[in-house]
Image (spheres, grey):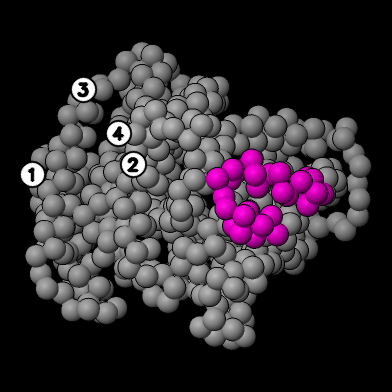
């Protein structure tokens, strides 16, 4: 079983890595073609609802996917095919209605999400939302189908399928560039560019659905027929699991709406947030899978009272490994934000001004990176304990806190145009800092709740070791920042690559040295294991 779990984790990690790399390339192409101009800025508002549904309903580990896996994994294929056909029918009917609503009410929905948009961006966003409305239907079908495939022990295709969405967008922009050339960056072509961006995004969702059909056929799970069967036990079980999970997952996505609501009054803020967020999510997604996939079954096996000491030890392990990886990564993103953004994005329409905006946002994201993964670790512990209510309550509270912090960090605006808290104004970076503050508060709240649930945790010891790692990360970030600032690096792509690589490498070495001297057990064990492997690797060579 352990070997099987490691194999599955490796397959998922490799497929996720390919999808993340493709997503990064897609974002580079978008940056070169549109920069932070009207087409992409409007796209971030138009994508809110379709993208929310695609992530919520069609994403791996989303509620539709998780419900199908949990129910179909315990049923024979013939029964699974019936359940999938019935769920496709019921969910498809509902999501066709959602698609129609998005088409009809696109204008007021964009006004709701982005009340501060100018007329040009508003009109482009309305047009883009109508092009992307069908994604609502395909999101549900994607989640159901890939959940059925995972239940049948097919893991590669669901994890790698987001690559198709990136390829579709890249291809669409390539065709537009072939037709317009350098004129693609002009304001006069923003509408056409926005349509191509939205249309190719929808095409990517369609491809994600189409690619699963042959795999479902091989597993005997596909039935191209309408099945209206509410009373089937499997269908009822899927619906019972899906409902609460969808509600809980949706709470996290509402924070995106809140941030964009306040971002609409800040020029180019939505575009900048999109670029910076991808730079954070790429390594965060990889490390999250590598950490959580192996730990989740461990937590689930240690819920008995007699296993409580080992469970506490494993919780510490998850949190310390999270801190040991996220703290230095966040510090390096703060110290090297501008060189990283310039290396990844600064070409074509993405100029130095856009790089400065996104660099500032990346610094803010870097500050909060440790809290992102630590929160996910704690939430999974509660799920393993059979408690979904506590994380849901904190997610609900987080929405209110996020709205308050967003409002405060953009100066406390009121409808009359006056800012009540001008001294707190942080621009677009304030929206990121609001999310950081909410994640930190949520982590503390979940830890205290977990302490009460488990009858005590050695929180002071955990805090001491976390502060030691934090100090090592700060020194690493300062070392990387000093080298990047103090050396006259060559210009151009290779100069940026050398700057980020060398300064980042020095930062990693400083962190490893200081963290090992700090004596945190998880770091010491990891470094010892790495040292033990290097000689054998050299001997094989």
Count of number-bearing discs: 4
In front of the other: 73 or 28: 28
- Residues shaded magenta: 98-127
Q: Is residue 119 magenta?
A: yes
**Residue 160 horizontal side relative to residue 236, left or right:** left
Image quarter of residue 198? bottom right
Q: Which mark is drawn over residue 460?
A: 3
Please, what secondary structure does the residue beneath circle 1 have? helix
> Which is closer to the viewer, label 2 or label 1?
2
Magenta-drawn stretch, dominant element (helix, strand or loop): helix
Q: Is residue 14 shown left or right of residue 528?
A: right
Left or right: where 179 falls relative to 326: right
Task: Please tell me whether residue 82 is drawn above or below residue 345 in the rendered image.
Answer: above
Does 228 lie within the magenta span? no
Q: Earlier in the sequence, mark 2 or mark 1?
A: 2
Residue matched to label 4: 423
Residue 230 sits in which quadrant?
top right
Q: Evaluate whether residue 442 shows in this view.
A: yes
What's the distance in space between the residues labelled 4 and 3, CA to CA?
Answer: 35 Å
User: Which residue is tagged 1?
Assistant: 517
Q: Is residue 418 above or below residue 500?
A: above
Q: In x, y percent, where is residue 354? A: 38, 63
Q: Nearer the viewer, residue 500 or 522?
A: 500
Q: Secondary structure at mark 4?
A: helix
Label 3: state its secondary structure. helix
**Residue at mark 2 to residue at mark 1: CA–CA distance:** 37 Å
Q: Residue at x 46, y 56 (%)?
A: 268
Q: CA distance from mark 1 to mark 3?
A: 20 Å
Q: Given contact means CB atoms under 8 Å apart, are the residues at marks 1 and 3 in contact?
A: no
Looking at the image, which residue is at 40% across and 55% down? 276
| Residue pointed to by mark 2 | 426
């Amino acid at each position: 079983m352990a070997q099987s779990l490691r194999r599955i984790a490796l397959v998922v990690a490799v497929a996720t890595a390919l999808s993340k790399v493709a997503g990064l390339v897609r974002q580079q192409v978008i940056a070169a073609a549109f920069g932070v101009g009207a087409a992409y800025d409007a796209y971030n508002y138009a994508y809110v609802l379709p993208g929310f549904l695609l992530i919520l309903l069609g994403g791996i580990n989303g509620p539709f996917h998780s419900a199908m896996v949990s129910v179909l994994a315990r049923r024979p294929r013939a029964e699974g095919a019936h359940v999938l056909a019935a769920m496709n029918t019921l969910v498809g009917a509902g999501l066709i209605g959602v698609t129609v609503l998005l088409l009809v009410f696109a204008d007021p929905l964009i006004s709701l999400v982005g009340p501060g948009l100018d007329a040009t961006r508003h009109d482009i966003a309305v047009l883009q939302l109508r092009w992307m409305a069908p994604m609502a239907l395909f999101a549900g079908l994607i989640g159901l189908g890939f959940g059925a495939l995972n239940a049948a022990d097919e893991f590669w295709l669901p994890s790698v399928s987001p690559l198709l969405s990136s390829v579709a967008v890249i291809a669409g922009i390539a065709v537009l560039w072939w037709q317009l050339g350098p004129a693609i960056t002009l304001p006069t072509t923003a509408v056409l560019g926005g349509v191509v961006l939205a249309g190719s995004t929808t095409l990517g969702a369609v491809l994600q659905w189409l690619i699963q059909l042959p795999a479902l056929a091989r597993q005997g799970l596909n039935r191209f027929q309408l099945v209206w069967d509410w009373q089937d036990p499997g269908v009822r079980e899927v619906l019972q699991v899906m409902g609460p999970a969808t509600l809980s997952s949706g709470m996290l996505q509402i924070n995106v709406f809140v941030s964009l609501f306040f971002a609409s009054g800040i020029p180019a803020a939505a575009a900048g947030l999109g670029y910076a967020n991808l730079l954070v999510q790429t390594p965060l997604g990889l490390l999250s899978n590598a950490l959580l996939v192996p730990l989740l079954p461990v937590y689930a096996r240690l819920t008995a009272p007699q296993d409580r000491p080992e469970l506490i030890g494993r919780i510490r392990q998850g949190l310390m490994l999270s801190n040991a990886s996220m703290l230095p990564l966040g510090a390096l993103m703060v110290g090297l934000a501008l060189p990283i953004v310039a290396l990844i994005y600064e070409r074509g329409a993405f100029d130095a001004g856009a790089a400065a905006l996104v660099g500032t946002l990346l610094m803010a994201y870097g500050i909060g990176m440790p809290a992102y993964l630590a929160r996910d670790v704690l939430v999974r512990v509660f799920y393993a304990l059979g408690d979904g209510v506590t994380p849901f309550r904190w997610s609900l509270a987080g929405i209110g806190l996020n709205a308050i912090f967003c409002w405060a960090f953009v100066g406390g605006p009121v409808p009359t145009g006056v800012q009540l808290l001008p001294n707190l104004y942080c621009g677009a970076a304030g929206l990121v800092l609001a999310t950081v503050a909410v994640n930190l508060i949520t982590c503390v709240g979940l830890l205290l709740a977990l302490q009460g649930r488990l009858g005590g945790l050695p929180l002071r010891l955990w805090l001491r070791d976390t502060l030691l790692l934090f100090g090592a990360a700060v020194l690493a970030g300062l070392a990387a920042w000093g080298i990047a600032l103090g050396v006259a690096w060559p210009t151009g792509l290779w100069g940026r690559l050398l700057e980020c690589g060398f300064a980042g490498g020095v930062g990693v070495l400083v962190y490893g040295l200081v963290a090992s001297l700090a004596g945190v057990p998880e770091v010491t064990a990891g470094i010892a294991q790495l040292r033990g492997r290097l000689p054998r690797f050299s001997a094989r060579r």
